[in-house]
């Protein structure tokens, strides 16, 4: 199943030798794409992931630009601690009386603090925690997993038993105890959470490295005398980057939820700092009287976690060759939202029922000739 | 309310008092439930044991019946076209193929990768991938398969048309016993059930030549050898006396002696049952051995078809001619005169050590794989010596330890015992730093072109990696060297910025060779470098290999299972069996005048691409086996 187009068939017939045909095809090939370029292409063809990426970027910019960060001022004139007179019972002024934002777009707390500023500040803290946790846990996980997978022997036993030790203690308990120790400092809390969430990635990276060890290009590198550092950094990690990036993304989403859970239980971010999770905790009692105080941070948590998850989905589809999808099976918005059935049924009706199997446009996956193993229907040939 | 406030409110003393107030009461309930579970398991085990030993099987009644045909064409393809929809547009895999297979006839479809031969055959079973669209018609004994509903097609599969796959290990389900898999075929199509099906299965196994089928049928696939597994797969295929059997590369994954046995079995079964066989293969020797007619495919089209003698002896189409020319030839038939000549020559040939010593030498080499602290010797007592500019062919079947020796030379495996001298230095005794430096002298080409190049490295970086590792040259010099080497392997220099996935298998293997040559090593290890390549591509790679060897004069350890390839390249040959050296000597001596029984069997089993000659060789092989006191099946 070589890749060719019908218009080249005539020239191929003239050359009665497979080797010649292949060389000619190589000459005729246009731009060459590296693996990462291919991945980027596939990622940007995944609509939900791209929309999520835009949404996440928008939320991040909004959170940091509105009230500023540290000494850098933002465009919003109120701070998250300053109190003021409670106007109109603290109702949100967004889209009221013909104005877009108004005085207090997300309303006010009982004490008259501007809730938009509070939500933005909470979102800053949550995003910082999420990304720091993502980076820290990924780094620890990659180092542990790569060392265990490459060196095997006692190093592997030691590292993997250590991983097991962390896994057997319930994550929430560990996070709660360590979270208490750093009491309130957001950066320290993020570091601590990163130090307890790396286990899954360490195991995945180890498994990936174990399978890469058997590849002949790794054998070739060992045979040419390359050092372990070079083999791990140049050959193994770049080839397991798919697993690493995808799981880093999912660990960011998990970190947001973990932080929210901890803060909701009163064990994470402490007053006067606020995060989205602690805001939900503080104002859960107000969910009947002042519901906006509960809903806005809750919705932000959901929006961030969902968009990060969709980005992870998009990355996984882009990296995993078995997930290659073409034509109408490429995930659209509806499919990603779990509404695939509706969409497909509509299409079937328009095309007319009773089609014989194996018609064009029903493709589910495509397999490049270079990777026959990724096609379950094609046997790997040993000649 | 947060958790902290809850924790603060707990009165621990009260809790303690509560706990002390409760007495521990022993209860039988959990033990009773556990006991019941145990009893059930025991009863099941005992009952299954008893049932199997007590059951009186009805006498086996399986015998191959003559398949009956309603038309004179068992299988007929009419203008079949298959197109795949892919990420990069559509691909025409098969472009209008028409041919037919008569009852009791073996038609071989030959072609190289991408010729569409496997796709063509998969249309007959409705097994094409989901992204394929098929046009044209396929008739099975007059019934149009392409128009059939899935239910009707299921009724045909395994009943009127069945398949023998390439890889017997994956064709059999490893978690089911062979008995389950065999009786399933009868039960699905309502031919026999229960004990009757089992009795039939036993007879079926006996007819495909599995010894002691009554007991062995209750074993799992991994307990059988590769050849026996393929026999079981064939048994599954012939169970319901099908009209047509599709054999998709049935012997490609097998060793050459096992291949000969499997081909014998298939020929016998076909003669007994009058079944039509569509044989898909790339091996012209297998074609000569089995086929009545041949269909040659190239790039999705049939370029030539006709009787086997006509195609193999006087091919008309240039593609077929070149394909046959590209086949490496094994010449093993010799006259008595020539044999004595060879003997005299080899006696006269004295293996004098050259002045600068052997490039590569093994003395009583023993190698072992270590698993959980236990070491398992796989190679023992191997001696060899290769001079500069010479090629030593390591030949043997799977499990003979030939690749293990290559691994040891590459330093991927520790030497267990004996000496391994590289340019006079004993590798296992060297300190680590010197060992690393010695690696400069060794280049390597591996078997699998898909896995031997790092997919994330552009070709230029792949080729110059050894230079980077050993810190040789500047970036400019490395780039210049990469271009030089690309010229040497006859690839355009602009592939330097391309990635391995854009290259075909043959091209990648050429890149592998270029990488191996980049430091101009004095030793090259080639581990089955052409086994995964097509015939014409293999010919090109071998040609280039010989050329480079002339040019660079490296000593080479060439590992292969293909005797014909060795005949083309090697100076000396070592035949290995189960980790032991069987025979070692000059090429002519081993291939033309072998002394050992095993070498003779190996040579006799290799098929040649000429039907008449192959028939003679088949007869000669049977006589040889009989003379050596071995069974024929």
Image (cartoon, coloured by chain):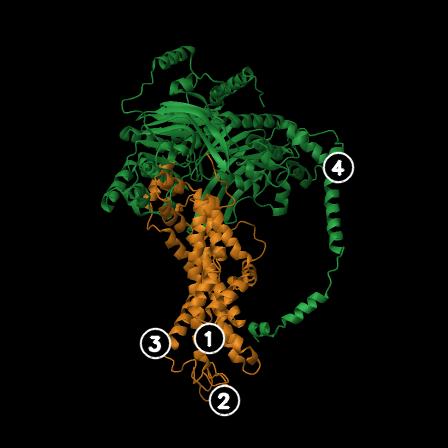
Chain colours: A orange, B green
Residues marked 2 and 4 touching at CB (< 8 Å): no
- For image coordinates 75% across by 37% down, the residue present is B51
**Which numbered disc flags the more N-terminal residue, 3 or 2?**
3
Mark 4, other Cα within 10 Å: few <14 / some 14–19 / many ≥20: few
- Subunit of mark 3? A
Separation of residues labelled 1 and 2 (CA atoms): 25 Å
Asked which secondary structure carries label 1, the reply is: loop
Judging from the image, what secondary structure is the residue with disc 2 in? helix
Marks 3/4: CA–CA distance: 83 Å
Q: Which residue has dot 2 on it?
A: A88
Image mark for residue B51? 4
Cβ atoms at labels 3 and 2 below 8 Å apart:
no
Among the 4 quarters of the image, the one containing residue B42: top right
- The quarter of the picture where the N terminus of chain B appears is bottom right
- Residue B525 position, x and y percent, is 37, 32
Which residue, given by chain and number where applicable, does mark 3 sit on? A71
Task: Say what secondary structure mark 3 lies in.
Answer: loop
For the residue carrying disc 1, how many other residues have a C-alpha within 10 Å: few (<14), some (14-19), or many (20+)? many
> Residue at label 1?
A274
Q: Residue at x 39, y 77 (%)?
A: A67
Front-most of residues B571 and B546:
B571
How much space separates mark 4 and mark 1, taking CA atoms? 71 Å
Image location of residue B435, percent across then percent down: 34, 36
| Res B38 visible | yes
């Amino acid at each position: 199943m070589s890749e060719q187009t019908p218009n080249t068939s005539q020239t191929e017939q003239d050359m009665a030798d497979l080797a010649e045909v292949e060389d000619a095809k190589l000459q005729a090939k246009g731009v060459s794409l590296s693996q990462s370029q291919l991945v980027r292409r596939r990622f940007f063809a995944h609509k939900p992931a791209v929309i999520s990426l835009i949404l996440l970027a928008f939320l991040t910019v909004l959170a940091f630009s509105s009230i500023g960060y540290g000494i850098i001022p933002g465009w919003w004139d109120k701070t998250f601690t300053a109190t003021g007179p409670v106007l109109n019972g603290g109702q949100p002024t967004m889209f009221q009386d013909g104005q877009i934002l108004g005085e207090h777009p997300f309303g006010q707390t009982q004490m008259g603090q501007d809730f938009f500023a509070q939500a933005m500040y909470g979102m800053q803290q949550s995003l910082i925690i999420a990304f720091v946790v993502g980076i820290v846990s990924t780094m620890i996980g990659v180092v542990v997993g790569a060392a265990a997978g490459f060196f095997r022997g006692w190093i592997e036993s030691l590292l993997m038993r250590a991983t097991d030790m962390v896994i057997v203690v319930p994550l929430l308990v560990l996070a709660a105890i360590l979270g208490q120790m750093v009491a309130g400092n957001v950066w320290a809390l993020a570091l601590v959470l990163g130090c307890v969430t790396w286990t899954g990635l360490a195991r995945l990276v180890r498994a990936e490295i174990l399978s890469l060890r058997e590849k002949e290009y790794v054998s070739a590198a060992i045979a040419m005398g390359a050092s372990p550092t070079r083999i791990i950094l140049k050959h193994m990690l770049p080839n397991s980057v798919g697993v690493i990036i995808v799981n880093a993304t999912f660990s960011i989403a998990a970190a947001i939820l973990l932080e929210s859970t901890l803060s909701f239980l009163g064990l994470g971010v402490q007053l006067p700092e606020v995060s989205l999770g602690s805001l939900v905790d503080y104002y859960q009692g107000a969910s009947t009287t002042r519901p906006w105080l509960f809903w806005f941070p809750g919705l932000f948590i959901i929006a961030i976690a969902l968009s990060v998850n969709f980005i992870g989905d998009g990355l996984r589809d882009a990296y995993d060759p078995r997930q290659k999808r073409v034509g109408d099976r490429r995930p659209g918005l509806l499919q990603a939202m779990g509404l695939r059935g509706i969409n497909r049924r509509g299409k079937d009706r328009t095309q007319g029922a009773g089609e014989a199997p194996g018609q064009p446009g029903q493709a589910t996956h495509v397999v490049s000739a270079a990777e026959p193993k990724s096609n379950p229907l094609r046997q790997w040939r040993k000649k | 309310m947060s958790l902290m406030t809850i924790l603060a409110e707990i009165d621990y003393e009260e809790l303690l008092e509560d706990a002390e107030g409760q007495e521990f009461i022993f209860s039988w309930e959990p033990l009773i439930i556990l006991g019941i579970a145990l009893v059930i398991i025991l009863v099941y085990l005992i009952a299954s044991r008893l049932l199997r030993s007590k059951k009186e099987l009805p006498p086996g009644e399986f015998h191959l019946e003559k398949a009956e045909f309603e038309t004179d064409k068992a299988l007929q393809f009419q203008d079949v076209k298959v197109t795949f929809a892919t990420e990069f547009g559509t691909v025409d895999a098969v472009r209008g193929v028409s041919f037919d297979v008569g009852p009791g006839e073996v038609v071989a479809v030959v072609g190289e990768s991408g010729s569409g031969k496997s796709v063509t055959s998969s249309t007959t079973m409705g097994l094409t991938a989901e992204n394929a669209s098929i046009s044209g018609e396929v008739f099975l004994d007059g019934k149009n398969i392409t128009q059939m509903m899935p239910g009707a097609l299921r009724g045909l599969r395994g009943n009127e048309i069945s398949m023998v796959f390439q890889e017997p290990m994956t064709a059999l389900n490893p978690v089911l016993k062979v008995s389950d898999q065999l009786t399933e075929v009868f039960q699905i199509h309502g031919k026999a059930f229960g004990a009757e099906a089992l009795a039939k299965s036993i007879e079926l196994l006996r007819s495909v030549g599995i010894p002691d089928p009554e007991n062995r049928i209750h074993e799992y696939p991994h307990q059988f050898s590769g050849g026996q597994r393929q026999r079981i797969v064939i048994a599954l295929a012939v169970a319901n006396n099908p009209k047509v059997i599709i054999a998709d590369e049935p012997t490609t994954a097998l060793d050459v002696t096992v291949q000969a046995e499997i081909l014998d079995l298939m020929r016998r079964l076909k003669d007994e049952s009058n079944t039509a066989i569509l044989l898909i293969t790339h091996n012209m020797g297998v074609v000569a051995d089995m086929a009545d007619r041949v269909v040659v495919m190239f790039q999705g089209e049939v370029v030539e078809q006709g009787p086997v003698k006509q195609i193999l002896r006087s091919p008309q189409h240039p593609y077929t001619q070149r394909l046959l020319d590209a086949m490496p030839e094994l010449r093993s038939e010799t006259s008595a005169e020539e044999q004595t000549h060879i003997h005299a020559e080899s006696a006269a040939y004295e293996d004098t050590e050259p002045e600068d010593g052997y490039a590569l030498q093994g003395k009583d080499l023993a190698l072992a794989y270590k698993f959980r602290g236990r070491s398992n010797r796989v190679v023992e007592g191997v001696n060899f010596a290769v001079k500069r500019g010479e090629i030593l062919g390591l030949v043997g079947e799977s499990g003979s330890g030939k690749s293990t020796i290559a691994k040891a030379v590459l330093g991927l495996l520790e030497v267990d015992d004996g000496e391994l001298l590289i340019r006079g230095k004993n590798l296992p005794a060297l300190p680590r730093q010197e060992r690393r430096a010695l690696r400069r002298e060794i280049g390597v080409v591996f078997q699998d072109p898909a896995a031997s190049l790092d997919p994330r490295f552009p070709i230029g970086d792949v080729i110059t990696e050894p230079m980077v590792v050993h810190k040789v040259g500047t970036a400019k010099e490395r780039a210049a060297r990469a271009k030089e080497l690309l010229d040497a392997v006859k690839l355009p220099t602009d592939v330097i910025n391309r990635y391995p996935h854009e290259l075909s298998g043959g091209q990648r293997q050429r890149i592998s060779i270029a990488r191996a040559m980049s430091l101009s090593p004095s030793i090259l290890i080639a581990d089955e470098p052409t086994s995964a390549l097509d015939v014409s591509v293999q010919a090109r790679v071998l040609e280039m290999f010989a050329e480079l060897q002339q040019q660079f004069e490296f000593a080479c350890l060439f590992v292969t299972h293909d005797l014909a390839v060795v005949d083309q390249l090697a100076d000396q040959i070592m035949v290995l069996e189960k980790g032991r050296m069987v025979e070692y000597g000059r090429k002519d001596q081993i291939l033309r005048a072998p002394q050992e029984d095993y070498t003779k069997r190996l040579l006799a089993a290799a098929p040649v691409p000429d039907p008449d000659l192959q028939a003679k060789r088949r007869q000669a092989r049977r006589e040889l086996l009989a003379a050596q006191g071995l069974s024929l099946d």
